[in-house]
Image: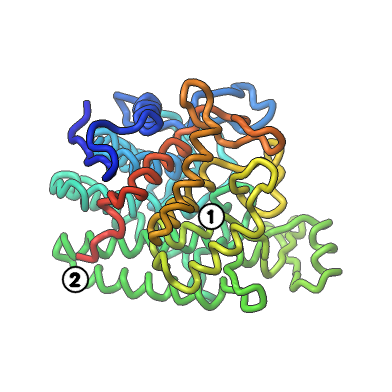
Amino acid sequence: QKNSTPEQSPGDKKRLPDEVQHSLLTLKLLCHRETGGIIAAPELDPFYTCCGGYAYCWPRDGFFAAVALDEAGFYKEARDFYLYCLKVQETDGSWKQRYFTDGRWAPFWGHQIDQVGAVLWGYAHHFTLTGEQNFLAAVWPSVCRGVNYLLRSLSPANNLPQPSFDLWEDNYCQSTYAAAATYGGLKAAAALAKTKGEPARAALWRETAAKVKKAILIRQWEAKTRCFLRGINRRISLNEYHWYKEHGYQVWSTTDPLGLYPVYWVGQDRRIDAALAGLVFPFRALKPTDFWTNRIIQAIEKFLTNRQVGGIHRYEGDVYAGGNPWVITTLWLSIIYALRGEKEKALSLYRWVIKNANPLGLLPEQVNKQVGGPAWVIPLGWSHAMLVLAYLALGNQLRGYPLAEN
């Protein structure tokens, strides 16, 4: 049941457009009524013949869905998801890669630290919009555990999160997106700490967030390309090790924790990544009109735009499921444009997504790079969440961005 009715965009006072209604309905159908878990998509590959499966609860995917639901006024569904996160949180304060809707561990292949920062940001976002003191009281222990995990996970060498798999789940490194999520999570937690009357914690968490942001600007900015790196200290294969070495990159080898086999590394991953947009939205390590944001947008447009059918690819050289442009990334750029006041550019990307929905208005993960139209998973909850957020951004109706500093 919907708990509030969002305002409409200036040009439409009567009803939400069909694509937004379809997206909200899709998100609600992906929510488990009893547990609050939100699956990424209905399963299309139950025997893992082409991928690792989609009918699981990723804290990351669910976070974006919950943010969209909250912004649209569906507070109950968002609250239920965050209470689900509270229940499945690990004792060390982290979250596993993904879970079943009943809270059991699902198959996973690597830790993803960005999910910790994202959930903390989501807790604060929900509280900002609702002011629910009971909710804050319920999640506060989870906030403290999550922050303590992030603090322990920062590398003393560079104040960035230790290497983990990035949000695309195919890159083990100190990713810039993970650092952005860590910054955002710490800042959000600091705001909650101030509300809870915990000034010492609030100050420590704000100061640590500032150190992470400084490290992002110093360590993950590449002066030669004048853009942020996808990540630093990336684990690579032996073949990649030799390729990078021959092309002048800093490379080295270590051994695994048990000392059984060699592990190879490269210092910088210079591939342009659309997830750099996360520095701006939602985590706001950068403002939409910052110099650094200008460079991110220029790089994404130049290197990730599909020149044949349109849309934005995830990162340079992406080959997953055919290497197509993604709905998520295209709408991410649309949101950034809208936040900058460049509404025509934002609307053009938004319309491209609508054009590539299926006849039922469902959004895929990807769009066929040769002929357009849906490719791979459909419907993808994250795609629908981004459409809702992009629509609201176009109408200047994102009520929880940026988060209040309290």
- Residue 391 in which image quadrant: top left
Instruction: Decide: is 42 above or below 155.
Output: above
- Mark 2 and mark 1 lie on one chain; the one further toward the N terminus is 2
Instruction: Tell me the amino acid under the disc marked 2.
Output: Pro
Residue 387 visible in this rendered orientation of the protein: yes
| Residue 233 percent coordinates (x, y) | 64, 66
Task: Name the residue at 47% across, 21% down.
Answer: 360
| Residue 132 percent coordinates (x, y) | 15, 46
> Label 2 crowding class (10 Å Cα cut-off): few <14, some 14-19, many 20+?
some
- Residue 8 in which image quadrant: top left
Query: Left or right: where does residue 230 sit relative to residue 33?
Result: right
Q: Helix, strand or loop at disc 2? A: helix
- Residue 10 in which image quadrant: top left
Tags 2 and 1 touching, CB below 8 Å:
no
Instruction: Tell me the amino acid under the disc marked 1.
Output: Ala
Q: Which residue is mark 1?
A: 275
Instruction: Decide: is 262 above or below 319.
Output: below
Label 2 and label 1: CA atoms lie apart by 33 Å
Task: Name the residue at 19% across, 49% down.
Answer: 136
Task: Name the residue at 80% across, 62% down.
Answer: 241
| Residue 337 percent coordinates (x, y) | 44, 57
Query: Left or right: where does residue 23 sit relative to residue 239?
Result: left
Q: Which numbered dot is residue 199?
A: 2
> Label 1 crowding class (10 Å Cα cut-off): few <14, some 14-19, many 20+?
many
- Between 328 and 118, the residue placed more toward the observer is 328
Task: Name the residue at 33% across, 75% down.
Answer: 207
Query: What colour scheme governs how the chains and residues are painted in the rendered image of this protein?
Result: rainbow
For the N terminus, the quadrant is top left
